[in-house]
Amino acid sequence: DPAEGGKNGVLIFKDEPFDFVVKKYTSTDNTLITKYETTFRLYDITDGQNVAVKLNGQYDIVTSKGVRTLLSTATEPKLTVGHTYRLVEYVAPNGYIMPNSTPSIEFTFDDDGSIISDANRVGAVEREENTISYTDDPIKLVLTKKDSGDRIQKEIILPNVSFTLYDTTVTPKECVGTATTNAKGEITFGGES
């Protein structure tokens, strides 16, 4: 109960802090993306405004191991019940692409601090856990190995050629996978979590 008795019959109201959680999943098998960070921004859009909300002095809200919890009292301005917010994904995790140009979810905090959202949204809202979930598509890379051929036989398909793909965005570079071309000279990296 947020109200306490004060002197001379005056009620003192205290704001109870509340939180919500942002989670990032793959679209292919709905597993939490824990290896890379996702960057979001939160806007208060109540009454037609568009005010960026800071968390610990930063506009960027970055997931850690696929999850980020935001406490109402740790933001500037403070998260407020009855206000409507828009959470926008700005940077997808490495190896993933956003399903549309700038996916966002609009939601309102109910009187008890729980999330209310309409059906027109990207992602999902889990009211019981006060969680907003986004999904991104894994990047799929398909290569076809061909020989340059000669004047008589143009572009010869080359099966059984091995490739190794590296992630050079991390130090030291990391092997993503090794695969061999199939009978059509094709090889696929990614497309799954």
Image: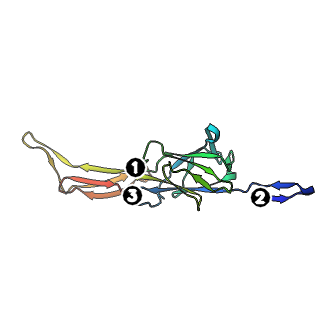
Give the SS element for disc 3.
Answer: loop
Residue designated by label 3: 28
As drawn, the label of residue 2 is 2
Mark earlier in primary sequence (2, 3): 2
Q: x%, y% of residue 132? A: 54, 55
On residue 22, which mark appears? none
The residue lying at 64 percent from left, 52 percent from top is 109
Q: Using the image as rendered, state which of residue 11 and residue 150 is in the foreground.
A: 11
Residue behind mark 1: 168
Using residue 64 as the reference point, say whether residue 185 is left or right of it: left
Q: CA distance from mark 3 to mark 1?
A: 24 Å
**Lateral position of residue 151 relative to residue 12, left or right:** left
**Quadrant location, the C terminus:** bottom left
- Mark earlier in primary sequence (1, 2): 2
Q: Is residue 113 left or right of residue 21?
A: right
The quarter holding residue 182 reads bottom left
Residue 23 sits above or below residue 41 on the image: below
Residue at the far front in the pictured view: 119
Question: Secondary structure under badge 2?
Answer: loop
